[in-house]
Amino acid sequence: MIRHATFADLALLPEVERSAAARFLRTPMAFAAAGDPLPVQTLAQAMADGLLWVAQDDDARPAGFALARPLDADLFLAEMSVALPMQGRGLGRALLQVVVEHARAAGIYRGVALTTDRELPWNGPFYRQAGFTEVPPAQQGPQLRAQLRHEAAAGFDPARRCAMRLPLPV
């Protein structure tokens, strides 16, 4: 089940994010497994804005989450994490669908955008299967370009990193 995050979820989401990041071990993005999770203040603000969703397990505990924010004219998927033991069960697809549905229902976004690794199967190929396409640099808005620069400064390989977008019908 996917639902909006609650205050009680906020303390549990960093562990979900750490668990999900463990999947990057033994990949070109291994450094991401040691990164800090999102600050609780960032999670709380997204929750207050109605842009933080949780996938819950059978015990109603968070097993995954998606956090979005406006960026340029799109809704930007800033983070999507599913705890490692819960991966492969469709929770990521369900979270992604809720974000897309929210953007569509809001009626103010031209699409859903994100940044990701082009090659890792649960990154670029996953989003391509969901209908996302790469956004060429000439078509990236200023905030999206700034996001990619920020990620490169944080250690992400710019040759592997890309912006992707799913356009929404007008």
Image (cartoon, rainbow, N blue to C red):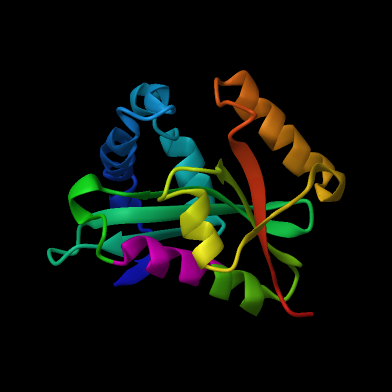
Left-right relation of 2 to 45? left
Left-right relation of 39 to 12? right
Residue 49 pos. (x, y %)? 57, 57
Residue 7 pos. (x, y %)? 35, 52
Quadrant of the image occupied by residue 55: bottom left
Magenta region includes residue 121:
no
Question: Is most of the magenta stretch helix, strand or loop?
Answer: helix
- Quarter of the picture containing the N terminus is bottom left
Q: Is residue 159 above or below residue 62?
A: above
Q: Considering depth in this image, is 87 or 98 the residue closer to the camera?
A: 87
Q: Is residue 32 above or below residue 136?
A: above
Q: Is residue 147 above or below residue 114?
A: above
Looking at the rendered structure, the number of numbered marks drawn on it comes to: 0
Residue 44 pos. (x, y %)? 46, 46
Q: In this view of the protein, can residue 143 be seen by the observer?
A: yes
Q: Considering depth in this image, is 41 or 22 the residue closer to the camera?
A: 22
Residue drawn where x is 35% and y is 58% of the image: 6
Q: Which residues are magenta?
A: 90-99
Q: Considering depth in this image, is 165 or 70 the residue closer to the camera?
A: 165
Residue drawn where x is 44% and y is 35% of the image: 38
Q: Considering depth in this image, is 26 or 67 the residue closer to the camera?
A: 26
Residue drawn where x is 34% and y is 46% of the image: 10
Q: Residue furthest right?
A: 138
Residue drawn where x is 82% and y is 47% of the image: 141
Quadrant of the image occupied by residue 133: bottom right
Magenta region includes residue 94:
yes
- Quarter of the picture containing the C terminus is bottom right
Q: In this view of the protein, can residue 50 be seen by the observer?
A: no
